[in-house]
Amino acid sequence: MTSDAREHEPTFTGEGAEPLGPDGLTVGRAAALVGVSVKTLHHWDAIGLVRPSGRTWAGYRVYSGDDIARIHRVLVYRELGSPLAGIGRVLDDPDADAREHLRRQRSQLVERIARLQKMVGAVDRVMEASKPGMRLTPEEQVEIFGADWQPAWAEQAEARWGDSAQWTQYAERAAGTTPQDWKTVAAATDALNADLATAKYAGVAPGSDEANALAERHRALISGHFDCTHSMQACMGRMYVSDAGYADAYEALAPGLTVWLRDVIFANAAAHGVDPESAKWV
């Protein structure tokens, strides 16, 4: 083979790859360069939208620099929503001012980018407005719930129950809760805890009318965050005893309060037809 012949011999990029001619790009290389599929370029070739204008000595059709430029113009028009048939008519119009077309394309793209940026901003605002959990700063949380409150508890609760339907319901309600609303919730919680501790010291028996009324106040308070059934409340009663964090909080109010509260909740659940020992989160 002569050196002149080797200069025009197609080269290959790998096993099964299309050869690259000396005067342009094969369809595979062109597709990779402009970011479309080979199938797309074959289709555009078939309909006469962008036809490779060159050939290698072996007959492979190749795309020249002008062909690639035309592909880029097609991509711009397609991004703007123009149909392929309309794009072909514009590009093939002999009286068309190519630079004027490019200026119009650029103007339309800038307008579209501006609209998309506004949409992104709107989506960000919606996401922030619907962000799950407490809509309070850590400082506001401590102010409302007391010096012992730890803002990290809210994040821990989300990590623990975030996949549940009840957390979703809580998050939806919390997103619309104002700081004043939270102060009302905190006051109601403090009042209930004080009454629970008083009842425990007074020897109120689980299952009594007074104890059942306290259990219903407890369930109503929880239901302000998500719909709490007697079965769910029984599950919470078990958790109060088994979870050191909850147990410590109740024991600080009154020694033995944790187990007593569980028994109060259990007795009230049983009165409503729920077996507290086998209760499920339903």
Image: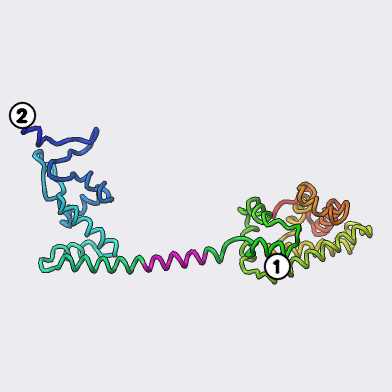
The magenta stretch is: 114-126
The answer to whether residue 266 is left or right of residue 228 is right
The answer to whether residue 172 shows anywhere in this view is: yes
Please name whichever residue, 266 or 236, is drawn nearer the observer in this view of the structure. Answer: 236
Q: Residue at x 12, y 44 (%)?
A: 23
Q: Is residue 104 magenta?
A: no
The answer to whether residue 275 shows anywhere in this view is: no
Classified by dominant secondary structure, the portion drawn in magenta counts as helix
Q: Is residue 115 magenta?
A: yes
Q: Residue at x 78, y 64 (%)?
A: 189
Mark 1, Cα crowd under 10 Å, few <14 / some 14-19 / many 20+, is some
Residue 184 image position (x, y, % from top left)? 74, 70
Quarter occupied by residue 201: bottom right
Tell me, what colour scheme is on the image?
Answer: rainbow
Amino acid type of disc 1? Trp
SS at mark 1 in the image:
helix
Point out which mark residue 2 bears.
Answer: 2
Residue 66 image position (x, y, % from top left)? 15, 54
Q: Quadrant of the N terminus?
A: top left
Point out which mark residue 182 bears.
Answer: 1
